Image (cartoon, rainbow, N blue to C red):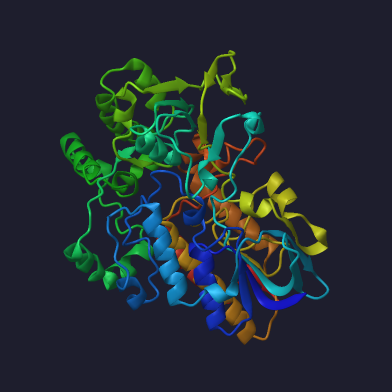
Amino acid sequence: MTELDAVVLGAGVAGLYQLHQLREQGLRVKAFDAAGDVGGTWWWNRYPGARFDSEGYIYQYLFDEKLYKDWSWSQKFPGQPEIERWMHYVTDRLDLRKDIQFGTRITSAHYDEGRGRWLVHTDQGDVIDTQFFVSCAGMLSAPLRNIPGIESFSGQLVFTSAYPAEGPDLAGKRVGVVGVGATGIQVIQTIASEVGHLTVFARTPQYMLPMKNPTYGPEDQDWYKSRFEELKATIPYTFSGFEYDFEHAWADCSPERRQEILEEIYQDGSLKLWLAGFGEVFFVEEISEAVSEFVRDKMRARLRGDQHLIDTLVPTDYGFGTHRVPLENGYLEVYHQDNVDLVNVRDNAIAQIRPEGIELADGTLHEFDVIILATGFDAGTGALTRIDVRGRDNRSLAEEWGQDIRTTMGLGKHGYPNLLTTAVPLAPSAALCNMTTCLQQQTEWISGAIRDLKADGKTTIEPTAEGEDAWVAHHEELANATLVPKTTSWYLGSNVPGKPRRLLSYIGGVGTYRQKCEDEAAGGYPTFSRT
């Protein structure tokens, strides 16, 4: 048995920084990750076309100016190989590797109330006795694999969430892709020119925005590096943790001016139309419909009046921005290629995978050499509910979240002392944030909470029942004032059968959330019990 002060689950963006901070406090700490190396999302997701849709220069750590400036991105929205190299750069600069155990999955974490410590087990036989158990497992790290017959396929079947580093050879092959979310879009637009024939199975259409991804030379790199102080002072306080924020009020603009603004922001080639256009799009049906129709018009024009493509790919039953908005580069044009077919499975669902390929509910069989599944995740909760996490009185986190998804600020759960969490529900990091912005803030708060606990001579910190009730009520009040809960998407856990329906992400804004967290700490942690 190993005795530690803290166990960190995960070695991605949050886990690396959390490990660094706790180690700087002098704690005995170790991180564990099932992956073969650092990177989290950027280690697992090696599928063709994987890249940022946050600008590279804001998807960075901001706690160390030299660390920031000594890395140079080659594009505005870099691809997975470059992102993974950046993660290695950070790991090596901070000398973190010696305190990370790779290829190791934590299988259980049980709280010993009598001793005030956690007993953590891994699939490699490790047993760790630790005071703090800190989850940095990520909000999209528990993939869904719920199509019947997966094991029966006689060709090569891969999940985008665990794509082989070398990848299958797709040249000249009959390839099927299931899923047209952000990941599916990146895959489809990348492989369409390489495969022999591509068949895409689409259920839920997506609003999407075109990506403009210029190459960065020395002048561009100097430009963004010179903005370090500006970015550090701005990014953590915007609505979404990006550098831009909402600037325009719908009521203050004439119809002509609204159209000009929409067109101007659309041409930016980023997520700006979603996260810095008109904030009323989240609240007012008529404004949501007007912006949605603007985006639909752009998509219809690119689909050249092909009604099958329009019916399958252009959303009409929910508003722009109430789902995740993907960026794309030539995606819609792929469907005009002679070697690409689009199958609408909204009303004729995938029934099963057979040895030959994919069978639909009506019995139609599509035969393939390779199947790529971009079928999503059990977001926010899945990483921890797949571990046997037990708190006071042997209560099960999987069972509790299976009944009602509740946390205090996404930083802890009542009944689980010294379990501190990032990227779980009821914080912006569950979906509505540039991830590095929110994960830095959450790990810094956790580090501060542990430091304050020790300074005050206490050993445990746990959300109170009253504090949790108050945060859930606040979260629901904000969520229900918007149009987002009226939709069906992974934002509400709708993609996981039986999952309690609740908006996973705090929608009050990144800056607002940060202030509430800072107030909690400055006020002596009033919604937490510290003993």
Q: Quadrant of residue 351?
A: top right
> Considering the image in quadrants, where does the C terminus appear?
bottom right
Q: Is residue 53 left or right of residue 129?
A: left
Position of residue 493 relative to residue 128, above or below, is above
Residue 246 % position (x, y): 30, 51
Residue at x 52% of width, y 21% of height? 367
> Considering the image in quadrants, where does the N terminus appear?
bottom right
| Foreground pick, 168 / 148 | 168
Position of residue 393 relative to residue 481, above or below, is below
| Foreground pick, 321 / 255 | 321
Residue 333 % position (x, y): 29, 29
Residue 318 % position (x, y): 43, 31
Q: Quadrant of residue 170?
A: top left
Q: Is residue 165 left or right of residue 195?
A: right
Position of residue 41 relative to residue 116, above or below, is above
Q: Is residue 460 visible?
A: yes
